Amino acid sequence: MKKFTLLLLLLPFMALAQTITITGTLKDATTNEPVEMASIGTLESNISVISNETGDFRITVPSATKSIYFSHLSYKAASLTLSGKDETVAIKLEQNQILLEETVITNKPIKEILKEAVSASKKRLEKSLVLNTYYREFAKVNNHYLKFADGLLDYNVKRKSGAADLYVQQSRAKQLVDNNTQIFKKMKNGDTESNTDIVGAMNIYDVKEAVADASNFKIINKLLDADNYNYELKLRKNSDGKDIEIIKVIPKPEVHEILYEGQVVYEADTKLILEIDVRTAESHKQYADLINVLFFKFKLLNLAKKVVFKNANNKYILSYSQNRLSVYVTNKNKFDDTFDFMSDVVTIDYKEGEFEFDKNKRYKKKDLFSAGNNFTTEYWKTSNMLLLTAGEENVLKSFE
């Protein structure tokens, strides 16, 4: 198989071709509410981005690109003809009319159907490619931002499990609280040991495993391994002609443990999973217990995970993965706080084939924050990425 050199991959994104940038907002045509997690891409390339929680997006494409398209499971597909120049647009998406939604009665256990969907999806996931991604991570304590890092990351995927070598091309990192703040101090034998970063020591999410975690359908397998859930299967026929099936995950009320709820959406014909949306069940949060870990006690307050895959041009790849976690932490030295951890990885482009990388440059740290400020361009102003909301931008600016 043809090999490409690392030099080719390290060329600035679209640097060899004239480009145009389309910036805009996606809103629901009926409610005028923002449309989050819509995919924006082109038919001529693998370039794509995701709209943020306020519906904002920015995509840079070759100037010869004729149009961009917008897709979301809940909305009709739409496109925008481009002028060949930079544009700012406001796009209204029409809700995908549901012609029929019915509960499916089947002789096969729905849990087995979900296993089959996971198996079919794993088999179809592409391997031997490089996912060019935008990654970001936040940490907060008692609703105050502590840390932020983001960057342009390449995952050299070798297996369908998503197992990959990680190469950080550019990154930035900000510590958003003064080190003298009590949150950043570790209590030891009654004395204060400054500049010890509690959040850094936790390392909730592993940036190296971001793609593998989603590609392994880890959260679904966790549900399937337990006997604590009921499942409901629904068939939905949309006005766009697509048939999708939805498996609802419902915690058993008689199980007095912290459990999850949510849904898995997949194509009815191929059984390829398109979306996973799972979170801590409100009905079972009351059963969360304090767990002893070293010198601390932890209680899970909330966990949420969303994963989006796209099946286009006969290619099935990870599009977006979002993680949110909230935990309460206490210890005998009056450490008594609530921490929130957030991470997002978005595939903004991908290249197929076998690639030569300098393995000595593989990123080995667990968090991206450790990569520090290592950038050659202000990529957050020009590159394809998941845009920060105005509120998030203001937080960063306040600490510059």
Image (spheres, grey):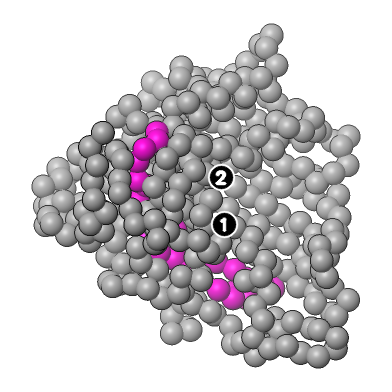
Residue position for label 1: 206
- Image point (35%, 46%), residue name: 130
- Relative side of 41 to 200, left or right: left
Q: In which quarter of the image is the C terminus?
A: bottom left
The percent coordinates of residue 133 (x first, y second) are 38, 53
Residue position for label 2: 213
Q: In this view, does 293 lie above or below 199?
A: above
147 in the magenta segment: yes
Q: What element carries label 2?
A: helix
Residue 50 appearing in the image = no
Judge by depth and name the residue closer to the eye, 182 or 16: 16
The percent coordinates of residue 315 (x first, y second) are 35, 31
Q: In whole angstroms, how far apart are the C-alphas of marks 1 and 2?
A: 9 Å
Q: In this view, does 168 lie above or below 223?
A: below
* The quadrant where residue 265 appears: top right
The percent coordinates of residue 275 (x first, y second) are 51, 36
* The quadrant where residue 11 appears: bottom left
Magenta stretch, main secondary structure, is strand
- Image point (86%, 55%), residue name: 289
Judge by depth and name the residue closer to the eye, 197 or 108: 197
Residue 172 appearing in the image = yes
| Other residues around mark 1 within 10 Å, as few (<14) / some (14–19) / many (≥20) | some
Query: From which residue to which does the magenta span run?
Result: 126-152
| Other residues around mark 2 within 10 Å, as few (<14) / some (14–19) / many (≥20) | some
